[in-house]
Amino acid sequence: MSKLSGKVAVVTGASKGIGAGIAKALAAEGAAVVVNYASSKAGADAVVDAITQAGGKAVAVQGDVARKADAHAIVDAAVSHYGRLDIVVNNSGVYEFAPLGEITEEHFHRQFNINVLGTLLTAQAALPHLGEGSSIINISSVAARITPPNASVYSGTKGAVDAITGSLARELGPKKIRVNAINPGLVETEGTHTANVSGSEMEQAIVAQTPLGRVGHVDDIARLAVFLASDDAGWVTGEALIASGGLR
């Protein structure tokens, strides 16, 4: 029997990259998935098509997680389509690097609104629908620990996500709702190619510091999300699982 048979999941920012991989992996284990996207309808539809062609259940839902009304609409779509909600993956996130002297209010608020406020609003919207054994998974980053230069705002958002994860684990533990984070290292995605990170000197420098000697793949993170969403992780909450090939 599939690990997530009968479960319903919302994955935010799931039109590409890590979010798309997680959505597909959850569906492959039997979950019906709401594939949220902010702007890339074509990407989200492609993820839904891949899931349904493999025999799974999925629907694409547009919404900006940094807006309370949108966060509630995303969650409501899961309940209206599938009748329940068991798994929330807060994957929506943006990154933009800048040295201290170039940080602007827009640079700050865009990242904190999506990465931090979006995580809180989506969890808040989901809470009334989550029952015993439900799982919230926040996608953070190893940047919260290695704190690279020119990434003070981005690293700050992910440090906040880690702190939120611990606080919500304690707050929701009495309801038997588990809350955990995954902290990926550098993972090859469409985004790393678009930003010219893949194949760059920066990537080579990161790989040189990584004990396992490679960048991550989307499946490396998706498998961890399946674990945290399933009963296999029934005694795991408040954790930030570092998936970075040993990079610290």
Image (spheres, grey):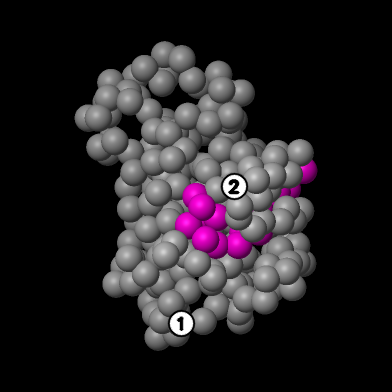
Residue 157 seen: no
Viewer-nearest residue: 224 or 127: 224
- The residue shown at (42%, 19%) is 202
Residue bearing mark 1:
132
Name the residue furthest left: 211
To which residue does mark 2 refer?
54
- Observer-nearest residue: 11 or 103? 11
Image location (x, y in percent) of residue 190? 58, 29
Residue 119 location, quadrant: bottom right
List x then y, in percent, for residue 38.
73, 48
Image location of residue 73, percent across then percent down? 75, 66
- Disc nearer the start of the sequence (1/2): 2
Which amino acid type corresponds to the residue marked 2 in the rendered image? Ala
* Quarter of the figure with the C terminus: top left
Residue that protrudes farthest toward the bottom in the picture: 174
Using the rendered image of the protein, determine whether residue 187 is visible from the camera's viewpoint: yes
Q: Is mark 2 on a helix, strand or loop?
A: loop
Quarter location, residue 128: bottom right
Query: Is 33 part of what is drawn in magenta?
Result: yes
For discs 1 and 2, the disc positioned in front in the rendered view: 2
Instruction: Residue at 47% x, 29% y: name it.
Output: 188
- Position in image of residue 87 (x %, y %): 52, 66
Residues in magenta, as a range = 25-41
Please give left or right for residue 204 compared with residue 55 in the image: left
- Determine whether, in the image, residue 224 is placed left or right of residue 197: left
Report the disc number at residue 99.
Answer: none
Q: What residue is drawn where x is 64% and y is 58%?
A: 57
Reply above or below: 144 against 7.
above
Identify which amino acid the numbered label 1 is placed on: Glu
Q: How far apart are marks 1 and 2 (CA)?
A: 29 Å
Q: What element carries label 1?
A: loop
Q: Which image quarter: residue 108?
A: top right
